[in-house]
Image (cartoon, grey):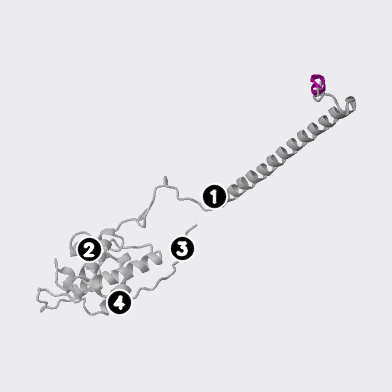
Amino acid sequence: MGPRDESELFLKDPHQTPKQISDPESRNIFRHRTNLNLWFLSSHSLVFIFTSLLWGSLFYTMDLSLQSRKSIKPIDETKPLGNITTKAKLLTCGWTPEEAKALGCQYDILSNHWVPGLCMDQKAVEEYQTDESWFGFADENRTELLSIDTMSEMKYYYTSERDHIVHCAMLWRKQFRAFFEERDNLDTIIADSEHTMHCSQFLMDMSDKGPDYRNMPIKTWVGYAGCWVKE
């Protein structure tokens, strides 16, 4: 094939149509190129459509996930947190039995404190008394038994370590009932974090004064708890 023949394989005018091309071989080349261009465009279009659908589905899934997360209200860390004593009025009993009585307070043998009458929990006291370790004595050897009235007038008196354990356990029960029932009146013993920490630590420390509980096996059952969430 000569130089002239080779040049005729290519279209002189790229914008010509097959009908405008008289040479059969050039017409075939033109049609081949046209088919290639159409295949190229269609393949890229399919890739574009598939990619668009893929990303669209991903964004839709992410949007649904975000909407579901928004339905759970996050904790507002900038909002000041209150506690059970917020907006509550504090009543006191003074510093002497006389002042306590004048202020309408009663002696609570469970907490060994004078307590304002509104916070007196007689049922908790009666539950505490059932253990019969609550009795107070004037001396360390616990030979001189005191009445409750006399106990309330003393600067201090003696009981037993058993009484201290029961005191902490019963206050824990009293505290739970008061919080669970959302009582309006709470004495400063069950509402005091320091006393709660003291009693819990005391109970743990007492386990070191008896048998070797650290090496005493016990079966522990696995449970599944719930969580009450206030809206």
Which residue corresponds to mark 2? 100
Dot 1, crowdedness within 10 Å: few (<14), some or many (≥20)?
Answer: few
Name the amino acid, label 3.
Trp
Which residue corresponds to mark 4? 127
Which element carries disc 2, helix, strand or loop?
Answer: helix
Q: Is 215 displayed left or right of 71 in the figure?
A: left
Numbered circle sitting on residue 70 = 1
The answer to if 5 sits in the magenta stretch is yes
In the rendered view, would you say 13 is above or below 210? above
In the rendered view, would you say 82 is above or below 18? below
Q: Is 227 displayed left or right of 51 in the figure?
A: left
State which tag comes first along the sequence, 3 or 4.
4
Give the Cα separation between the discs numbered 3 and 1.
20 Å
Between residues 21 and 70, which one lies in front from this camera angle?
A: 21
Magenta-tinted stretch: 2-7
Which circle, 4 or 2, is nearer the viewer?
4
- Where does residue 212 sit, x and y in percent of width and height? 21, 74
